[in-house]
Image (tube, grey):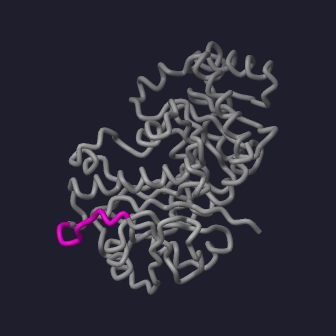
Amino acid sequence: MEKAIIAVPMGDPAGIGPEIAVKALKEEELYKRAKPLVVGDRNVLSQALQFCGVKAAINTIRDPREGRYIPGILDLIDLANVEISRLKMGKIQALGGRAAYEYIEKAVQLALDKKVDALATTPINKESLRAAGVPYIGHTEILEDLTKTPNPLTMFQVFDLRVFFLSRHVSLREACDLVEEERVYNFILRSHDALRLLGFQDAKIAVAGLNPHGGEGGLFGREEIEEIKPAIARAVKDGIDVSGPYPADSVFYFGLQGAYDAVLSLYHDQGHIATKMVDFERTISVTNNLPFLRTSVDHGTAFDIAGSGQASAVSMIEAIKLASQYAFRFKRG
């Protein structure tokens, strides 16, 4: 079986990224599915091995084709960009922000050069990026600029529940104002295209409602009648298998049971709560419309426990698994 090479940029070296990377890559099961490759700093990775009590050899390579990709060996592209004596674990610092950005930059270049098949990213810290003068607030903005991809589309997946988001980092009041026919229609089309790239040729999409009980025919709000239903009707005319709006207190449950391939959430917390209540650690973020596939853990740098070896690697393991599951489907898309 052909296995995808998954680049794992190490994240902020002062956070838990290096620790969850080494913990994840001690799992033999991962190597049956993928060829994981860390992009980071050898000294930081060695320190993380000590923090976590993990025994593994580090194989420093220049090109992904040189990797051994076997349990007990951590294949690493070493950027050697952290002076370990200056690194302060669990602290906001320019050193960490700059290093984290450079790991992402290198991993992206490897993907654009077709040397790796997908990325599975670890946490970075917004304040450390700012301290380093890196002009982005997070992964999505970095990836958008480095790949020249306007408005990348985020999808969450936990088990068989996939969720897209009509809006994300805006106030709830603004999110309600963004529930407009044209925007809903556009996101149905984008979600359909993203699912096709992931291998779902006849995807079935459900749209969540905005108001309680889906508005109850206008009793609790008219967005379902005036904005959402017309958008769905237009998409159906385009040949897309989409339906709704369905009350948000049930549609995600039915999506998890397999009634739909994906659900379009109408605002940030609507979809985040639905997925994370299923399994917080196994909720994985997928960025779809880049030139390559990117998955990510959905937690932060956890500066409060960085360096203690306590961090759970479950989300990192799941992110690598999901990247390997979709990588070749995405390339064929």
Q: Is 310 positioned to the left or the right of 191 in the image?
A: left
- Is 85 included in the stretch rendered in magenta? yes
Q: Nearer the viewer, residue 88 or 315?
A: 88
The residue lying at 42 percent from left, 23 percent from top is 174
The residue lying at 48 percent from left, 23 percent from top is 176
Quadrant in the picture for residue 84 = bottom left
Q: Position of residue 73 (x, y in %)?
A: 52, 80
User: What range is drawn magenta here?
Assistant: 79-86
Q: Quadrant of the C terminus?
A: top right
Q: Position of residue 163 (x, y in %)?
A: 61, 42
Q: Nearer the viewer, residue 302 or 142?
A: 142
Q: Nearer the viewer, residue 297 or 184?
A: 297
Quadrant in the picture for residue 229 = top right
Residue at the far left in the pictured view: 86
Q: Nearer the viewer, residue 107 or 261?
A: 107
Q: Is 46 positioned to the left or the right of 236 in the image?
A: left
Residue at the far top in the pictured view: 226
Q: Position of residue 257 (x, y in %)?
A: 74, 51
